[in-house]
Amino acid sequence: MRSRLKCGTCRTVGKYHLQENCASICARVPPRFSQCQRSEEVTTVRRLLLYFLIASVVLFEGAVLLSVSTPQGRAGVKAVLFIPQVLADMPLKPLELLTRKPTREMIEFPLAEGMGSADLYLPHGSGRHSAVLFYLGVVPPDRDESRVVALGEALARSGVVVMIPWLQTQVQNKIVPEDIDGLVRGFQRLRELDRVDPDRVGMGGISTGASMATVAAQDERIRSQVRFVNFFAGYYDASDLVRAIGSRSRFYGDRVARWDPDELTVRLLTEHLIDGVADPDDKAALIRMLIDKAPNTDGGPVRLTEEGFAVYRLIQGEAFEDVDELMEQLSPETKEFLDLISPATHIDRLEARMLMMHDRADRLVPSEESRRLAESLGNESDTYYTEFSLFQSAIQVHTDGGGDLGPLDYVSEAFKLFRHMYVVMREVS
């Protein structure tokens, strides 16, 4: 029987864990954040409060709840030490004081055609460790970007071998179904490494990378070998994501609210929908109007087929109630593409434990996508799902806009991150 959610608390819904605040339950609308820069005073108080939180959790986990000699205690301490490594506001990185710098190297793995490359972050020393393949999806593929390196090193300092694959399509900002096979092959290569315990290997990703990793984890070649998937802010059904972008709305059940997608999200929708247009004249006209922003030099009106006009309207934005009819007019190739890249298509094949996290203010993918994924896994699953209002403020995951949290809210959200990372560390410890 499902437990009732109470405002400001964490509860188990069926067997998946949901953390959220009252506002998101009642309104399901992300709070509007100030666009101004955080004041020095707020930042100082935030740091002090977060230091207090970290110290309190360490004492609680180590001295009251669990001994560090137990797996639970070690996972708790690792989670506490991990958080400052990935939050830019934290000048003190205690994990760097307590652990040796990990090794970073580039490795190759075979693809269906040619070779793929990946960055490998290895814990200092020798011996076998748990491991995770973490896919960043459609992002500017800078393997030296500070947040990417911080994530890889933080996990490696926590005793996890980290593989971050870099596929050619990332350079092109393209999502292609063939990359799923590349992720499967990368996972197989990771399990073969001498420093990896093959029975403790998972997958993870962020945004589109989380969804593609989840589809890869359903593949019959590896699905029984993927121990967990850390699903950060991905989509469940690509068709629903198109509906959200095309209507500039977020929706869950009967609730529909305004949503302002990030410019990267709109650009991806534009390029991928136009790629699937069957009529070459339509495709050329749409590229000229919506990508090149070039004037019509023919002098006459632009004529589009029914499919081309549907794509045009979805990209420009339409009322939510009109979107389903426009989706029906997309080409069979586009519909097949959306099915192939959706975790929803073969969710019954997934065997890995799902550890899911999503920011309520996410403008790349609405958090309702993660809710639908958690719901689809059912009450009998061991899914752990946490919603935050932290990552845009603390990590800046979007390409435009910004956000801010007050000090107390910041500490509350950081504690949720601790609880989530505790579960992750339990899986890899």
Image (cartoon, grey):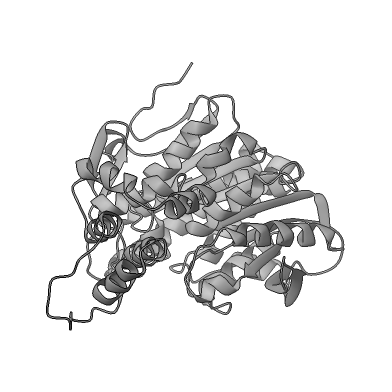
Residue in front for this viewpoint, 24 or 342: 342
Of the pair 210 and 77, the residue shown nearer to us: 210
Residue 324: where, in percent of width, then height? 29, 42
Residue closest to the far top: 1
Q: Residue furthest bottom?
A: 297
Give the total of numbered labels. 0
Between 210 and 55, the residue placed more toward the observer is 210
Residue that appears at 43% across and 38% down: 371
Q: Residue at x 48, y 68 (%)?
A: 174
Q: Is residue 366 left or right of residue 174?
A: left
Residue 137 at x, y = what percent?
53, 63
Residue 309, picture quadrant? bottom left
Residue drawn where x is 75% and y is 66% of the image = 123
Q: Is residue 245 left or right of residue 186?
A: left
Residue 412 appears in the picture as rendered: no
In the image, is residue 126 above or below residue 75? below
Q: Identify whether 204 is placed above or below 324.
A: below
Task: Reply above or below: 400 against 202.
Answer: below
x and y percent of residue 77 in the render? 64, 51
Where's residue 38, x and y in %?
28, 68
* Image quadrant assignment for residue 184: bottom right
